Image: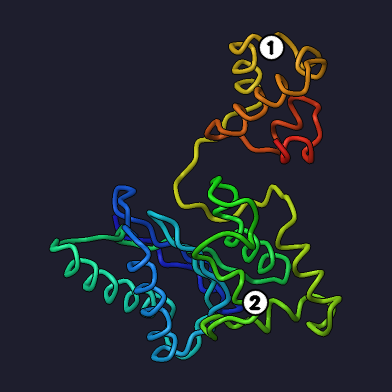
Amino acid sequence: MPRVARIKSRSGIYHVILRGVNKQTIFEDDEDRTRFLYVLQKYKEVCHFKFYAYCLMDNHIHLLIREKEEPIGLAIKRISSSYVYWYNTKYERCGHLFQERYRSENVESKHSFLTVLRYIHQNPVKAGLAENVFEANWTSMNEYFGGTGLIDVDLGLSLFSGGEGKTATQQFVDYMGAPNDDTCLDCWERVRLNDSEVKEFLHEMGISNVSVLQQMERDHRDAVLLQLKETAGVSIRQISRVTGISKSVIQRV
């Protein structure tokens, strides 16, 4: 079946995901991650794209990019080919590393830009790899407070009080670190459970109705909520809706 052509972003901005073929690890160590950032810097200068955010996870990558003279697809091809050549040489391997076609979503409004920006920076937090966005390794978060110049920070900062002064900085910090239930393009396709399936899951855990859960001692209740949060296909918003427990409580578990 022929591939469906991508719909071009009106703003030229895209949230791009590169993922390892068959969920393969694409960064074995920090040297690999450093090399990938070097490749990004190199092709930013060659392709002249604007670059707003990145997050390097073990088996996938998030990028927030605005195409300029060169189509985003060609820029991504240059980046991935260069890194794969280096990686294959280092590890004495051959063949594909990335899944053949990158995934992308168009980012065409202030709201969607900020949502994706936060989503990318919070990826390690939501994966349990960091306490907060400012302690996460291998994201562009700290580029916004005096980095290497790889990231174009002006657009993101300008969306808070015009990007000027301590007020704008604090608003940016608060927004980036805020607990949320943002939904963006994800790395892997997810199967969503419906509310009835979540209730059945609770029943299997011995929770006959939500009143029982609400009246539990906090430690026991939180253990149940944590198990729900770690269940594939269940969102924080859905847990709150099914259990009657506030999203803020669930997020803190």
Q: Say which of 73 and 4 sits in front.
A: 73
Q: Residue beneath label 2, please?
A: 144
**Residue at the disc numbered 1:** 207
Quarter of the image for the C terminus: give it: top right
Q: Check disc 2 and give the amino acid type.
A: Tyr
**Above-or-below relation of 166 to 200:** below
Answer left or right for 34 relative to 144: left
Kindly identify the residue that appears in the image at 65 percent across and 62 percent down. 118
Q: Residue at x 32, y 79 (%)?
A: 78
Nearer the observer, 36 or 76: 36
In the picture, measured across the screen, residue 16 lies left or right of residue 9, that is: left
The location of residue 48, given as percent across then percent down, is 46, 90
Residue at the (78%, 16%) spot, across then down: 216
Q: Quadrant of the N terminus?
A: bottom left
> Up-down: is 221 above or below 64?
above
What secondary structure is found at the residue carrying circle 2? helix
Query: Which residue is at 23% across, 73% downward?
Result: 86
Give coordinates of residue 215: x percent, y percent: 82, 15
Instruction: Using residue 76 as the reference point, say whether residue 206 is left or right of it.
Output: right
Specify the amino acid type for callout 1: Ile
Percent x, y of residue 51: 53, 79
